[in-house]
Image (cartoon, rainbow, N blue to C red):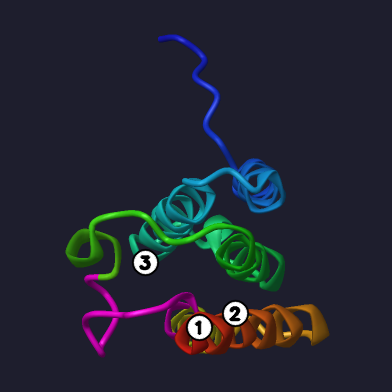
Amino acid sequence: QKDVAKPDIVCYSIVIDAFANSRLMEASSVAHRLLRAVETKYEAGDVSMKPNTRIYTAVILALVHSPFIGDEQSELADDVSGKHTNNAQRAWSILERMKNNDATPNSFTYNYIINCAAQAGHDAEN
């Protein structure tokens, strides 16, 4: 049997953080998909893959730096509210998931959510 290396929570954290800071157009979609992969592994019983504050906060930061481009239904199927119209709503949804998984938001988390809300307000004015 081959010795297969599997990504751990640190690997996911590094990649999500890299996308969050990349400012690529697709960064928020990729970061969200990676977060869902981590959450799915954790929900399947892999306690070593418990999403932490750093991962959730990085995904919210990705929303600050890039618009969400993705299939709303598949990307956000786990969200109770259904369709989201802006990144501020997506950030709030991620915050709720964060709290549900016992990850404690920090000042960076709230700062990035405020930035998403400010951008949504600015976009609504234009």
Q: Which residue is mark 1?
A: 88
x%, y% of residue 88?
50, 83
Q: Nearest the camera: 6 or 12?
A: 12
Q: Nearest the camera: 87 or 125?
A: 125
The correct choice, above or below, for 18 with respect to 60 in the image is above
Cα distance, mark 2 to mark 1? Answer: 8 Å
Cα distance, mark 2 to mark 3? Answer: 33 Å
User: In the shown orientation, is residue 16 left or right of residue 1?
Assistant: right
User: In the shown orientation, is residue 114 left or right of residue 106?
Assistant: left
Cα distance, mark 1 to mark 3? Answer: 26 Å
The residue shown at (48%, 61%) is: 67
Name the image quarter holding residue 85: bottom left
Q: Amino acid at mark 2?
A: Gln
Circle 3: element type:
helix
For marks 2 and 1 on the same chain, the one whose residue lies earlier in the sequence? 1
Circle 2: element type:
helix
The numbered mark at residue 43 is 3
Asked if the residue under mark 1 is in contact with the one under mark 2, i.e. CB atoms within 8 Å, the reply is yes
Q: Is residue 53 magenta?
A: no
The numbered mark at residue 119 is 2
Asked if the residue under mark 3 is in contact with the one under mark 1, i.e. CB atoms within 8 Å, the reply is no
For marks 1 and 3 on the same chain, the one whose residue lies earlier in the sequence? 3
Secondary structure mostly taken by the magenta-highlighted segment of the chain: loop
Q: Amino acid at mark 1?
A: Ala
The residue shown at (72%, 50%) is: 21
- Choose mark 1 or mark 3, whichever is in front: 1
Q: Amino acid at mark 3?
A: Glu
Q: Which residues are magenta?
A: 77-90
